[in-house]
Amino acid sequence: MAWILIAFFFTPVSLAGEYPEEIQIAVISDVPITAAAAHILQLAYQRLGVRMTTVHSPARRALMMADTGLVDGGMFRTSHAANIYPNLVQVEHVLLKGELRAVVLPGNGHVLNMPSTKPRKVAVRRGVIIAERMATELGMEPVSANTYEQARQLLKYGRVDVAFISHIEDFGPLALKDWQEFEILPEPVTRFNLYHFLNQRHEALAKALPNVLRQIEEEGTKKRILDSFRGRPNEGSVERSPLKKQQTHLQA
């Protein structure tokens, strides 16, 4: 009996069939690419026999929820997320590619190249790590905004010199009419890759997903999903579920 118990506990997760029936992923509210990315991931999880639902949350809270185990993972972030949140496991396949664009008031395209006696103020969405990191690297003073609309207001009324806006797979708020009054600098501040993240208790899933996501990309399904969502007024919707109440025991 002892040897049977030992064999049971040391059976690899993939062989023991221990993928959960359902997982809950935190997503950032009002980010246009979210619905398309959710459909890609829902398909990938479906092929592994797992149902994926989403919970909408502010950007930084979404990471904290995934890190503490309140939800099972985060939709997509840059690889730096794993350096900040130790309980997150990166799914090693590039889910999406994006650019960080600088937006200024009309006629102020030269502002970033002009000398200044004090740091330029830049609106960054709270919890968007790539924008926060680039603001620091460029010696600018970040001004946090809870939404892209708030960032737009900060720029419009001169509270900041520039706004950093993420543009992902040709999705982003810059295509909206309200942003057309500004000047978008032609060269991106930086380019970046986005990865799906899971809480460490789902490490087996994190190891299984890259092959599935690669297959979805190679067969052209990923492109078809992205194309089907471009141009929609609200970029579609994703399936949501109430936040599950669960107790977890994690090691930081």
Image (cartoon, rainbow, N blue to C red):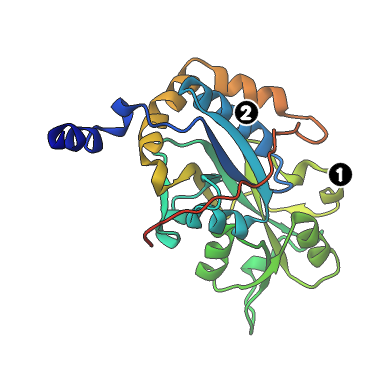
Q: Secondary structure at mark 1?
A: helix
Q: Image point 48% across, 42% down: which residue?
A: 195
Count all numbered tags in the image, as a single digit. 2
Please state the horizontal and vertical placement of residue 173, each as a whole percent of the image.
Answer: 75, 46
- Single out the residue that lies furthest toward the top: 219
Could you classify mark 1 by the number of other residues whose Cα lies within 10 Å: few (under 14), some (14-19), or many (20 or more)? few
Q: Amino acid at mark 2?
A: His
* Location of mark 2 (residue): 39
Q: Residue 68 got which mark?
A: none
In the foreground, 55 or 209:
55
- Badges 1 and 2: C-beta atoms under 8 Å apart? no
Say whether disc 1 or disc 2 marks the residue closer to the N-terminus: 2
Q: Considering only vertical position in the picture, is 93 above or below 149?
A: above
Front one among 27 and 146: 27
194 left or right of 126? left
Q: Is residue 191 placed above or below 116 in the rendered structure? A: above
Is residue 140 shown to the viewer in this render? Answer: yes
